[in-house]
């Protein structure tokens, strides 16, 4: 089991989504938006940093499960000023997670949409709808919060796939056998999974 915090950085609104991963199952925990209603960029960055720190500390306090974080990478916007502001907001979010000694995984918008919708150029509305379906939500989250949840879902799918690959490579040559195209786990391998 693990808690995954997904972050969709923005200089005006930073979305976050938190899910719990238990094997293949994902459970919704929390989602929201950190709004920075000010013109001063240093104040915006402070609000992003403090908001994400406060939210993460709350979840660290009430769980013994490992917490993973994932953030959307900066895309090259047509407006260089917008790209710089987005990069600064992203930096504040990463700094908040690293200050809490959490590792940060990065995913492109295309990777996130591919993981959630099966299509790397999906519209924001499609991402919202698929997040609701995957997490069995009755209420559609705000777009930035849905993007944060989508980032967490992407990390869950990526880490689950990586674990399978690691397990498969570890099984080769460790007493496991292969019959008719399938690996068979030994008792020792099963014990190591628990």
Image (spheres, rainbow, N blue to C red):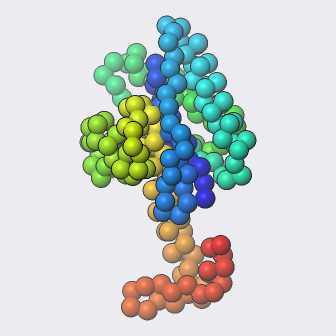
Please say if 151 is above or below 9: below
Quarter of the rendering occupied by the N terminus: bottom right
Residue at the image point whose x is 49% and y is 68% from the top:
165
Q: For this view, does 5 lie left or right of residue 151?
A: right
Please say if 21 is above or below 169: above
Which corner quadrant of the image does residue 51 belong to?
Answer: top right
Q: For this view, does 151 lie left or right of residue 66?
A: left
Please say if 64 is above or below 176: above
Residue at the image point whose x is 46% and y is 42% from the top:
149
Quarter of the rendering occupied by the C terminus: bottom right
Quick one: 191 or 32, which is closer to the camera? 32
Q: Position of residue 9 (x, y in %)?
A: 48, 29
Residue at the front extreme, as displayed:
138
Q: Position of residue 107 (x, y in %)?
A: 44, 44
Q: For this view, does 190 lie left or right of residue 109?
A: right
Q: Position of residue 106 (x, y in %)?
A: 49, 43
Quick one: 31 or 106, which is closer to the camera? 31
Residue at the image point whose x is 71% and y is 44% from the top:
62
Let me know if residue 132 appears in the view.
yes
Let me know if residue 105 appears in the view.
no
Q: Position of residue 69 (x, y in %)?
A: 57, 43
């Amino acid at each position: 089991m693990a808690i995954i915090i997904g972050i969709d950085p923005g200089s005006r609104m930073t979305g976050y989504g938190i899910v719990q991963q238990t094997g293949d199952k994902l459970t919704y925990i929390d989602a929201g938006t950190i709004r920075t209603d000010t013109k001063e960029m240093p104040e915006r960055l402070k609000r992003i940093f403090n908001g994400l720190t406060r939210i993460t500390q709350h979840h660290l306090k009430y769980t013994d499960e490992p917490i993973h974080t994932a953030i959307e990478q900066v895309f090259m916007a047509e407006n260089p000023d917008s790209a710089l502001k987005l990069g600064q907001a992203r930096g504040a979010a990463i700094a908040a997670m690293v200050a809490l000694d959490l590792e940060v995984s990065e995913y492109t918008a295309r990777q996130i949409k591919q993981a959630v919708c099966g299509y790397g150029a999906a519209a924001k509305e499609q991402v919202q709808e698929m997040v609701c379906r995957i997490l069995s939500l009755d209420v559609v989250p705000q777009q930035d919060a849905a993007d944060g949840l989508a980032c967490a879902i992407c990390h869950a799918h990526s880490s689950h796939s990586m674990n399978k690959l690691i397990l498969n490579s570890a099984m080769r040559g460790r007493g496991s056998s292969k019959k008719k195209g399938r690996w068979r786990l030994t008792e020792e391998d099963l014990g190591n999974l628990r």
